[in-house]
Image (tube, rainbow, N blue to C red):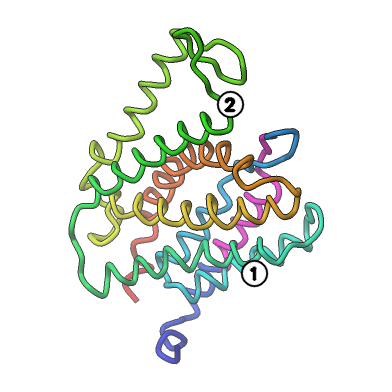
């Protein structure tokens, strides 16, 4: 811990503060909610990206502090319902988890390509989403026809779903080896860090917090949140990967 404190320079704090401010703006002002079961269960925003980037660049301690500050400041400047400490914990972890993984990559000088691992993770998430939709009877098959929310799914939509499914699974492989300002943070490793963070925080903790807050079953909220995570993972990965190219100098302290 003492060593981590010594590595926190003024420049890092200034950059982390800027990323914290970006997170507050994205999370509290530039977002939209997708209702699920009549409740605002899915939040779509870019607020997590600056926090993950802070953890990747400056480590779990600074990343966690960025997440803590972003949530507490956000509650003050634009409260959205009653304060819930679980959401604050999740905000802290958005910086801590990528920071821990990035430190592991740097400390062990891991240059292994994670593209195949990422594709397997996304493939399993897609299968999990389909299984969850069938389990909750949001998706069903009757007399050879596919139904979504008791409405028949057209052939065009089915083909589009297959294309999106394939793109999600093979995109990490297609973009393998793309550098993001540092050999330890190529695109495949960014996708891995974002995927793990989303599985633990968004799919796990945040779904649980929402089930407590809205008194809804975990599995009722889970399918929609899994769907949103599948869309968010590649978007956040590309955004963070792009930003890493412009913050390369921050890693050279």
Which residue is nearer to you in this view: 140 or 84? 140
Q: Main secondary structure of the magenta part?
A: helix
Q: Residue at x 54, y 54 (%)?
A: 204
Mark 2 crowdedness (10 Å alpha carbons): few <14, some 14-19, many ≥20: some
User: Could you tell me residue 238's position as x and y percent?
Assistant: 39, 44
- Whole-Å distance between the Cαs marked 1 and 2? 38 Å
User: Could you tell me residue 123's position as x and y percent?
Assistant: 34, 38
Is 72 positioned to the left or the right of 187 in the image? right
User: Could you tell me residue 31's position as x and y percent?
Assistant: 65, 42
Badges 1 and 2: C-beta atoms under 8 Å apart? no
SS for tag 2? loop
The residue positioned farthest toward the bottom in the image shown: 2
Q: Find residue 138 and name its label.
A: 2
Residue 1 figure quarter = bottom left
SS for tag 1? helix
Which residue is nearer to you in this view: 216 or 173? 216
User: What residue did someone put label 1 on?
Assistant: 69
Q: Is residue 176 above or below residue 104?
A: above
User: Could you tell me residue 108's position as x and y percent?
Assistant: 22, 73
Q: Which residues, given as a range, are shown in magenta?
A: 17-34
Count of residue discs: 2
Q: Is residue 15 above or below residue 211?
A: below
| Earlier residue among tags 1 and 2 | 1
Mark 1 vs mark 2: in front: 2
């Amino acid at each position: 811990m003492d060593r981590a404190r010594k590595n926190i320079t003024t420049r890092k704090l200034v950059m982390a503060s800027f990323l914290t401010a970006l997170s507050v703006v994205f999370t509290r002002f530039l977002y939209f909610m997708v209702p699920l079961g009549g409740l605002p269960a899915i939040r779509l925003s870019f607020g997590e990206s600056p926090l993950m980037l802070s953890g990747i660049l400056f480590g779990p301690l600074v990343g966690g502090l960025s997440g803590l500050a972003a949530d507490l400041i956000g509650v003050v400047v634009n409260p959205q319902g009653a304060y819930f400490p679980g959401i604050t914990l999740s905000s802290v972890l958005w910086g801590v988890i990528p920071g821990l993984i990035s430190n592991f990559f740097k400390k062990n000088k891991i240059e292994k390509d994670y593209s195949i691992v990422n594709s397997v993770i996304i493939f399993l998430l897609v299968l999990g989403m389909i299984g969850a939709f069938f389990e909750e009877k949001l998706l069903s098959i009757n007399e050879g026809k596919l139904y979504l929310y008791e409405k028949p799914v057209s052939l065009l939509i089915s083909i589009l779903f297959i294309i999106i499914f394939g793109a999600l699974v093979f995109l990490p492989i297609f973009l393998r080896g793309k550098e993001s300002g540092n050999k330890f943070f190529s695109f495949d490793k960014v996708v891995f860090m974002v995927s793990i963070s989303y599985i633990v925080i968004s799919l796990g903790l945040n779904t649980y917090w929402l089930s407590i807050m809205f008194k809804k079953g975990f599995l009722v909220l889970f399918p929609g949140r899994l769907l949103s995570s599948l869309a968010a993972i590649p978007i956040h990965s590309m955004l963070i990967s792009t930003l890493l190219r412009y913050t390369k100098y921050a890693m050279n302290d």
